[in-house]
Amino acid sequence: MSAYYKSIDGLRAIAVVGVILYHCGLATFSGGYTGVDVFFVISGYLIVSGIARDIDANSFSLKSYLVRRVRRIVPVLIGMLFVVSFASVFILLPEDLDFYGLSLLGASAFIPNVIFNKAFSYFTSSNSPVIHLWSIGVEVQFYVGISLFLVCLSKMKLLNRTLFLVVLLSLISFVSNIVLIENHQNPVFYYTPFRFWEFGLGAIVGLGMLPALRHKILENVLSFLGVILVLAPIFIYDTTWLFPGFAALAPCLGTAIILYCIESDAVLVRALRQPVLTLVGKASYSIYIWHWPIIFFYEYSLDRAMAANDIAILLVAIFAVGFASWYVIENPFYQQKNRPNSKPLIFGCLGSFAVLLLFGGGLVHFKGFPERLPPAALAVIDEAEYVEPSGCPENAPDIRERSRTDSYCVIGDQNASPSWALWGDSHARALSGPFSEMLLQNKESALLLGLHGCPALLDINVTHYLSGLCQTHNQNAYQRLLAQPGIRNVIMSSRYSLYLYDTATGGLAGQRKTINLMDGEGSRLTEQERITLFRKAYQETMQKVVSLGKNIYVMTPMPEAEFNIPEVLSRTFWRGGRDSDIKIPETDYLRLNEVVLEAMDAVAKKYPGKIHWISPHDAFCKDGACDVMADGHILYRDSNHPSSFAAHILLAPIARELQSPN
C-alpha cells in the first residue's frame, strides 16, 4: 500500500474511533459525531477525483464503478441487517420493532436518512439499532448522483467545467445549510443536498484546484492546523451545538487541509501512517457498520446507566466484530472487484434486499408483533403512551410560534376567562391534560404557558433555542401574568436540573440531547456558572412572581431515572419480573436536585406562606426509594415526565382548591 493511502486510512481511523467513543457516551468525546463529516470529505476527495481522472483517460465505466461500490458497501450491510433483524424479534418492544421495520425498509432502499428525518433528531434518537445508517444513505446517494453528474458533463463535453460546478454547488449547499439550520435542523442534518459541500471540499482538493506544496515548513504548519481542526471538535462540541451549520466547517476544513498535505512528508501526516491507525482505517467501514447495533442492543437490555466496565466490554466487542466482518466479508468481496462476471453478486444482493424488504414490511404491517409480550407488559406500554388531551396542539412548531407571538392556548372551559396559568417546560405541559379536565369540571380555564426545553426563569437563554426564544417566551409569560389580574393562580413546573448539568433528555448512549442554561446574552457557561446563574435567576423570578400577589403553586423536582422507565418495566414483565424490581434510589434524586432544592428552600424561607409546594418526592418516595408504579399504574411516560395517572395524583391539591368555595 502506498504512503498516500496509508495516510487516508489513518484519518479514517481517527474518524471512526471518534464516532464510537461518542456513541459509547463518553463525555470527553462529546463531539465525536463529527467523525462522520470527516468520512464525507474523504469520500468527496477520492470519488470525484477518481471518476474525473478515469473519464479523462477514457477508461471510466459507470457499470464497473457502481459494481465496485456495491462490493465495498453492500455485503457487510446485508450481513449486519440480517443479524440485527433476527436479534430485534427477541429483544425489541413492539413500538421499537415496528419502527425498526420502517428503518429496514429505508436502509434496504438506501434512503434511511429520509426515514429518520421524518421520525426524530439524530441527537435525541428513537430506539433504532440502525440510526447510524443515515450516513450510509447520504454516501450512497452521493456516489450515484456524482457519477451520473460527471458522466453527463462528459457527454455534453463540459468535463473541463467540473471544478467550477463543484465549487458552485458546494457554495449553494453550504449557504443553504447556514440559512436553514436553525429552523430546519433535521433536513439540514440528514439530507444529501445540505451535506454536498462537505463532499465538495474534498473534491476541490482532489481535483487539483490548489497549488502543489513545495516547502516542508508550510507542509508541517498546514498539517498541524488540519489535525487541530479535526480533533478539537471531538473534544469541544456536544449535542448543544447547532450542527451541521457553521460548526461543521472546522472538521471538514481540517480534513480537506490534511488531504491537501496527504502526500507530503510532514510529521503529522507520517503519524497517520502508523500501523495501528492504518489497520483500523482499513476496517473502518465494517467497524462503523457494526458499532451502533452492538452498543444499542447492549444498553437496550440494561435496566441501569452504563458503567466504565460496560464501555470496556463494548469496545472489545465492536473492534472484534468489526475486524472479523472486514476479514471475512468486506475484504474478500472487495478483492474480487475486477472480476468480469458481477451477475451473481448483483442478483445475490437484490435477493437479499427483497427478503429484508418483505421482513421490514411485515414488521410494520403487524405493528411489531405485540402478541410476543404478556398483558402486563402491554398495559405498561399503552398507559405510558397515553397522553390525556388538553385541547391544545402539541406539535413543536405550533408551540414555538405561540411562545414567540404571545398567543398562548387556553385549556379547560373555553367559555371562562383564565383564572389560572400553568408555566414551565415540558414538565408543565405533562400536567396540562389532567389539569384541563379538572378545570373543565369546575368551569374554569387556564393559560398554558409551556415551552419544551425552556424552564420558567426570567432573563435567561438555553442552548436549545439559540435564537433567544426561551427568553422571549418567559418574558411574554410574565407579562401575561402581570397584565391579567383575573389570573389569580399560577402553577410552575420545570425540570431545572436538566439545564444545569449534562442530563439527557432521552435516547440511548451517545444519542442524548442535552440542554444547557445560558445567560441573557446567550453566552455558553461552565457547569458552575450555570449553577450560579440558576440560583440568581430563580430567586429573582420568584421575587417577581410573588410580588404579583397571586396564589403560587410550585412543583418540586420529579424523581427521574437514567433509563426509560416504561421500556424497562415492559422488558421486566416480559422476562417474568415484577415492578418492585425497578426503583429510583432516593439518594440519586437528592444528589441530582441538591442545588434546585436548596434554591427552592431559600425562596420558601424568604416568602413564608406565599408559595404552595407540590412534592413528587413526598408522593412517590419512601424507605429510601421512589416508586415507578402505584396501584397497578405506571407513574412515568419516559425517564422523567409524569404519566397522566401520576399527574392526577400530583394535582390533587389543585383539584381540592378548584372544588372549594371561593
Image (cartoon, rainbow, N blue to C red):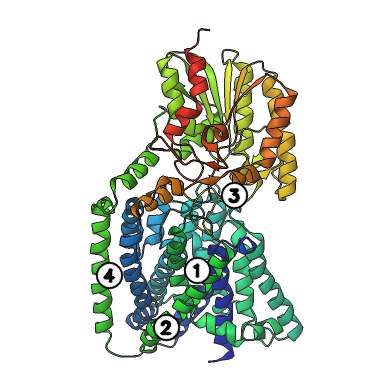
- Residue 548 appears in view: yes
Q: Secondary structure at mark 4?
A: helix
Type of amino acid at the residue the image marks with label 4: Phe
Q: Secondary structure at mark 3?
A: loop
Q: Which mark is residue 503?
A: 3
* Mark 2 lies on residue: 55
Instruction: Give 305 or 386, whichever is nearer the viewer.
Output: 305
Instruction: Give 95 or 480, whichever is nearer the viewer.
Output: 95
Type of amino acid at the residue the image marks with label 1: Leu
For label 2, count other residues whose C-alpha is less than 10 Å away and answer few (under 14), some (14-19) or many (20+). some
First along the sequence among labels 4 and 3: 4
Question: How far apart are the alpha carbons under marks 2 and 4?
Answer: 31 Å
Question: How far apart are the alpha carbons under marks 3 and 2?
Answer: 52 Å
First along the sequence among labels 1 and 3: 1
* Mark 4 lies on residue: 353
Instruction: Give 385 or 378, whichever is nearer the viewer.
Output: 378
Left or right? Give the position of 245 relative to 214.
left
Q: Position of residue 372 (x, y in %)?
A: 27, 54
For label 4, count other residues whose C-alpha is less than 10 Å away and answer few (under 14), some (14-19) or many (20+). many
Question: How far apart are the alpha carbons under marks 1 and 4?
Answer: 35 Å
First along the sequence among labels 2 and 4: 2
First along the sequence among labels 1 and 4: 1
- Residue 134 appears in view: no
Q: Secondary structure at mark 2?
A: helix
Q: Position of residue 637 (x, y in %)?
A: 44, 41
Q: Secondary structure at mark 1?
A: helix
Q: Which mark is residue 165?
A: 1
For label 3, count other residues whose C-alpha is less than 10 Å away and answer few (under 14), some (14-19) or many (20+). some
First along the sequence among labels 2 and 1: 2
First along the sequence among labels 3 and 2: 2
